Amino acid sequence: MNVDKKNIVLVDFDKDEKWSFPKTLESVTHAEWETKRHVTNHFHGGLLPNLLRFFWYFFFPLIILIRRKQYDKVIGWQQFYGLNFAFWSRFLGLKKVNDLTVMTFIYKKKGGLKGKLYHKYMSYIVTSKYIDRFICFAKEECHYYSDIFGIDESKFIYVPLGHPMLTDIQIADDGYIFSTGRSNRDYDFLVNSLKNTNFKLIIACDTYYASHGNELNINVLNKCYGNDMLSLMAKCHCVVVPLKNLKMSSGQLVVLQAMSLGKPVICTDADGIRDYVINGSTGFLIDNVEEQLLAVLNELYVDAKKYTELSNNAKECYLSHFTEDAMYERIANTLKC
């Protein structure tokens, strides 16, 4: 590591001065780190917000690229900030001067002409010399992406996701099932499975607008974020994470939030989830089959002993393996190596 240069983390969300990731990086790497941010994670739900988000995905990395010689290591915490830093570097034929890490790398195949163009764009970047490593939050992804892009698997590094301890949140059990998140969710499966039951379901998602007719037991909240969302999770009986694409990494953050609150989770049995949920111990892994979902829900509502066991195991597993500080240290040690 070049100690004469600074290092930089590129993020797309607001983080206060107490954010411990840069401090962990400095402690482990013995080098100076700074954070540059341009908030884009609120640009969703329409053509104009999406266009603005895509614009900043390209323009913000270009601003940093102009000053690239000031930095030794660059971390794209928002993956498209890191990916497009590499895109501009290759497109402009620049000399490689930075060690570049792309965080939270996720690639989902798309269909049709749009999918072919997207794959060419991603391949153009991923196969370039400008990215030194990709951080993935599921072991299987490392094999999967290596096969898709035809590059050495060693460039994809598995680091367990972490989440900060949730404090000052009142935990209760108001009896309802809770689900949240927008990426790769199969809410139609969840709604269709529960609409004719006595279970009460609350979904917090700003991109799910399906009509549920007169189903009084289902409530979809399109403007529920941050602490409001976490407060709802803290008062539920259990959390369900229904996923569509079994190869795509998604849902882990919600799983960890639930585990940190001691809430049992029911998840689609997907590659990216098996590293976080121990079936029958900290939660349940199921296929997207109505009978399987209803069976485990009935168990959680009827068997109080099993519920308490899952709740305690989930909280203990989170504290042992999936705290935010543990993730930060693993990433920092990866850069040091």
Image: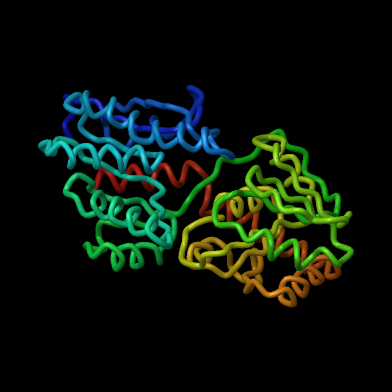
* Residue drawn 25% across the image and 56% down it: 155
Residue 265, quarter of the rendered image: bottom right
The answer to which of 126 and 332 lies nearer the viewer is: 126
Q: Is residue 166 above or below residue 286?
A: above
Q: How many marks?
A: 0
Name the side, left or right, on which 161 lies relative to 58.
right
Residue 13: x and y in percent read 49, 31
Tell me the colour scheme of the image.
Answer: rainbow
Q: Residue furthest front?
A: 113
Place of residue 226 in the rendered image (x, y in percent of width and height, measured from the top left): 65, 35
- Of the pair 175 and 294, the residue shown nearer to us: 294
Q: Position of residue 113 (x, y in %)?
A: 37, 58
Relative image position of residue 11 (x, y in whole percent): 41, 33
Residue placed at 52% from the left, 33% from the top? 48
Q: Is residue 221 above or below residue 48?
A: below
Q: Residue at x 31, y 30 (%)?
A: 8
Q: Is residue 32 left or right of residue 325?
A: left
| Quadrant housing residue 119 | bottom left
Relative to residue 142, is residue 211 depicted above or below? above
- Which residue is located at x 20 percent, y 24 percent? 70
Horizontal placement of 52 versus 203: left or right?
left
In the picture, measured across the screen, residue 253 lies left or right of residue 52, that is: right
Q: Quick check: 221 above or below 184?
A: above
Quadrant assignment for the N terminus: top left
